[in-house]
Amino acid sequence: MLRLNKTNFIDSADAMCVRIQGYVSLLCRGMTMAGAVNATTILARLPYSETIYKISTDGKTYDQ
């Protein structure tokens, strides 16, 4: 499968956590990433981009 039902075209683990549970936590980040990696086909691995991250989170940033 190329995309999960709960993902947007440009998405991040943090954005998914906020949509699903309303906040970001390390546990949610890990579970989200593990679920995405196991259930989808990765077409490209891109380096971190703050611009793309902010697009996925509507301009918000979250602490580590």
Image: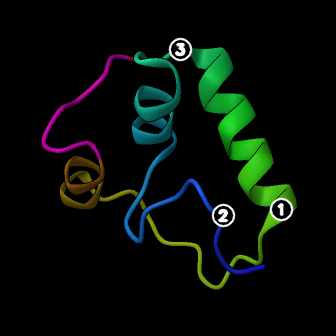
Mark 2 vs mark 3, foreground winner is: 2
Q: Which quarter of the rendering shows the N terminus?
A: bottom right
Left or right: residue 40 compared with residue 12: right
Label 3 neighbour load within 10 Å: few <14, some 14-19, many 20+: some
Mark 3 vs mark 1, foreground winner is: 1
Distance CA(mark 2)–CA(mark 3): 21 Å
Give the residue number, with chain letter if any, for mark 2.
4
Q: Earlier in the sequence, mark 1 or mark 2?
A: 2
Residues at marks 1 and 2 touching, judged by CB atoms closer than 8 Å: yes
Q: Which mark is residue 39?
A: 1
State the image coordinates of residue 27 (x, y, percent, origin top left).
68, 17
The residue drawn where x is 58% and y is 73% is: 45
Q: Amino acid at mark 3?
A: Ser
Toward the viewer: 42 or 64?
A: 42
In the figure, 60 relative to 4: above or below?
above
Give the residue number, with chain letter if any, for mark 3.
25
In the figure, 20 relative to 27: above or below?
below
The residue drawn where x is 43% and y is 63% is: 8
Q: Amino acid at mark 1?
A: Ala
What predominant SS class does the magenta segment belong to?
A: loop
Toward the viewer: 64 or 31?
A: 31
Task: Give the quadrant of residue 31.
Answer: top right
Distance CA(mark 1)–CA(mark 2): 8 Å
State the image coordinates of residue 51 (x, y, percent, origin top left).
18, 58
Distance CA(mark 3)–CA(mark 1): 21 Å
Mark 1 vs mark 2, foreground winner is: 2
Please report the bounds of the magenta region as a residue range: 57-63
Left or right: residue 50 compared with residue 64: left
